[in-house]
Amino acid sequence: MDSFYEKEFSDVPDALAFLAKVVSMSSTPSSTGLEQGLKPRHVTMLSIAGVIGAGLFVGSGHAIAAAGPAVLLAYAAAGTLVVLVMRMLGEMAVASPDTGSFSTYADRAIGHWAGFTIGWLYWWFWVLVIPLEANAAATILHAWFPGVDIWAFALVITMLLTVTNLFSVKNYGEFEFWFALIKVLAIIGFIGLGLAAIFGFLPTSQVSGVSHLFDSGGFLPNGMGAVLGAILTTMFSFMGTEIVTIAAAESKDPGKQISKATNSVIWRIGLFYLVSIFIVVALVPWNDPTLANLGSYQTVLERMGIPNAKMIVDIVVLVAVTSCLNSALYTSSRMLFSLGKRGDAPAMSTRTNKSGTPYWAVMLSTGAAFLCTFANYVAPAAVFEFLLASSGAIALLVYLVIAFSQLRMRKQSVARGEKIEFSMWLFPGLTYAVIIFIVAALTIMLFQEAHRVEILATGLLSLMVVAAGLLVSRRRKLEKRGAVVLS
């Protein structure tokens, strides 16, 4: 299989180069910037469903099995963290919309090395997401069409979405609009059926009421330690909420779109996560093994007597992972474009075509994703495991940088006498509270065996990127001094 895969993918770099050549035939100088092609409905739907991934439909079963009904506390705590982080990011993004988002703000507030580091780490995170989500989607399709290999489905899905991302940001927005709409309708339908089952209005349901919240060892069966562990797990399921601040920079009224999206975070997390997870733990005992084996949504739908529950969940999960793959392609390319504009990535990444799409940034990100996929087949297993682990704590590092950047930028704005149009609540108290919480979470992860490898791998990668950032900053200072002397 390895040799076959290697043979089949040997022409991928040439194919990518050819595709980039075709797209670049209508290229314009990078100074023209990106097209403001995202419509308000695109940004709105992206903000509503951007946080919904396969983790909610399938992965939540593992968190429930670990913490019991008290997993609701874990989701509430993780959701609160995301709400606060988004409020801080919203304050900066409304004042200065930028496709580099928090990476650009870190550059301005903390220093060039910080923006360089978090920008490249974030790009790496989403580059790794591309092959993972492609493989997840391909696995579902392979189960339906076993005659087609998983790698073939993964290749076709990735290439199709790459092509749609190459020509116009409208394509990304349109695809994501319909992907998000399907996810939203699926969750609303699930909540409606769940509430009907709880109140006994669903005649096909085998379950009703909310007794399972307490009848299997109580609400907190495994103690607060299990809840803390679940918090660490659930925090990463919210990664992607910040994408709307990147995408809004390509809309016609970014400040308004960002403020609307940020204000909607609370009800989005409350409805899509807390309410749906409440229905799961109310209708199914938390220690039911099918929660972790089949996934929370499929288990509940089967208990409610919904026909073809597995097929329904598979379709929704396929849409969710394809949506995540689509966003990963978009986000990684825009972060690379921003890094290129600041001189921290190859200059070719800033080239745009007539539709304002950074086509080389898209191709380079996709190419890096293919290399990671290739490594999964030809490199020792430990190598790919390290690559995956190296992105494990990036979400928390991003949140930490956002908090520090907001702290510094607010002080700078106040010193300049600027009006804060969209402000963080209870500043600076809540900002400091977020910083303390994230540092504590990272420390706990270091001492937990389940997360230690992630912390060490992410820490090693971060140190390497920080070192590179410091070298680039030093080179820039020397060049500036040389320019001053010459002038």
Image: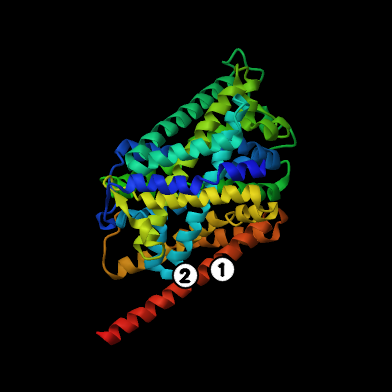
205 sits to left or right of 465: right
**Who is closer to the viewer here, 231 or 428?**
231
Q: Is 287 placed above or below 255 here?
A: above
**Who is closer to the viewer here, 31 or 338?**
31
Q: Quadrant of the N terminus?
A: top right
Q: Which residue lies furthest to the top in this view?
A: 203
Q: Which mark is residue 469?
A: 2
Q: At which x and y percent is residue 372?
A: 57, 51
**Who is closer to the viewer here, 260 or 49?**
49
Q: Which residue lies furthest to the right in this view?
A: 217
Total numbered labels: 2
SS at badge 1: helix
Residue count near mark 2 (Cα–Cα under 10 Å), binned few <14, some 14–19, many ≥20: many
Q: At which x and y percent is residue 239?
A: 51, 48
Q: Which residue is disc 1 drawn over?
A: 463
167 sits to left or right of 81: left
Q: Quadrant of residue 393?
A: bottom right
For image coordinates 61% across by 42% down, the residue present is: 5
Q: Is 351 placed above or below 174 here?
A: below
SS at badge 2: helix
**Who is closer to the viewer here, 200 or 332?**
332
Residue 405 seen in render: yes
| Label 2, label 1: how far apart the Cα atoms are | 10 Å
Of callouts 2 and 1, the N-terminal one: 1
For image coordinates 70% across by 42% down, the residue present is: 66
Q: In which quarter of the image is the C terminus?
A: bottom left
Residue type pointed to by label 2:
Gly
